[in-house]
Image: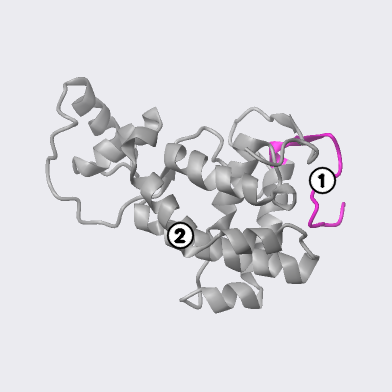
């Protein structure tokens, strides 16, 4: 069995299962770190930074160790507003936790990009992130549907709620709020790639996709 390493699988093509296992291992180490414990408010808190890493893999083709500030900026300011359904004010917490992770990666692994990322992930950046998460013009089609259904009072975290929202949309009733929804806002990602392999290593029937790892000689400024 190959030992876990911060750099991740060392080969040109990596399967989704391998990428997810690597990310899970990194998040598990972060959750045990003093940096995460200093950030977490509850004893049983779990890290959410894995969502950033998963989206970086899915949409940028990058493992966490390959990301610099430009990459994290693209994930947070472009991919999140399009794909992730969560309250805009959660942006502050994602940035704070990413900062905690970067401090951990810098101390534990000597992560070279950490210093620049920490300098750039400021309160001003978090505010911009929050504004973009609230900008409906940036929502993807599926996120727009999830948000509209939630605001109309449907339980979009259940199959029954989704089906009811689809019927309402098809009948032209989705834009009219039906009632106040009294549970916390959901956090969903409107992508077919969010299913992680289960403990048996299976991917719930999903096709195993291999992806070429991007080289860091690519553009630095975008």
Q: Is residue 202 left or right of residue 216?
A: left
What is the span of residues highlighted in magenta in the rendered image?
A: 1-17
What is the quadrant of residue 217 in the picture?
top right
The relative height of residue 105 versus residue 66 in the rendered view (above or below) is below
Mark toward the start of the polypeptide (1 vs 2): 1
- Magenta stretch prevailing secondary structure: loop
Q: Is residue 7 magenta?
A: yes
Q: Name the residue furthest front.
A: 221
Query: Where residue 183 sits in the image (x, y, percent)?
Result: 25, 56
Residue under label 1: 9
- Residue contact at pointers 1 and 2, CB within 8 angstroms: no
The relative height of residue 72 versus residue 107 in the rendered view (above or below) is above
What is the quadrant of residue 110 in the picture?
bottom right
Q: Which residue appears at 55% of the width and 50% of the height?
A: 51
Query: Where residue 107 sits in the image (x, y, percent)?
Result: 75, 71
Residue under label 2: 124
Q: Which residue appears at 77% of the width and 59% of the height?
A: 112
């Amino acid at each position: 069995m190959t030992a876990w390493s911060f750099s991740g699988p060392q080969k040109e093509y990596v399967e989704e299962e391998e990428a997810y296992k690597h990310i899970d291992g990194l998040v598990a180490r972060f959750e045990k770190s003093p940096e995460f414990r200093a950030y977490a408010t509850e004893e049983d808190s779990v890290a959410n930074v894995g969502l950033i890493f998963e989206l970086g893999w899915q949409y940028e083709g990058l493992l966490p160790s390959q990301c610099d500030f430009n990459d994290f900026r693209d994930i947070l300011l472009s991919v999140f507003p399009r794909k992730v359904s969560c309250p805009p004010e959660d942006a502050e917490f994602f940035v704070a936790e990413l900062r905690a992770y970067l401090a951990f990666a810098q101390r534990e692994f000597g992560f070279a990009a950490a210093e620049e990322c920490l300098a750039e992930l400021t309160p001003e950046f978090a505010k911009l992130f929050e504004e973009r998460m609230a900008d409906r013009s940036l929502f993807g089609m599926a996120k727009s549907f999830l948000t509209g259904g939630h605001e109309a009072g449907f339980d979009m975290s259940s199959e029954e709620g989704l089906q009811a929202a689809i019927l309402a949309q098809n009948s032209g009733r989705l834009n009219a709020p039906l009632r106040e929804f009294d549970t916390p806002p959901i956090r969903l990602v409107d992508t077919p790639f969010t299913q992680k392999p289960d403990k048996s290593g299976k991917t719930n029937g999903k096709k195993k996709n291999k992806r070429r790892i991007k080289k860091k000689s690519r553009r630095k400024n975008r």
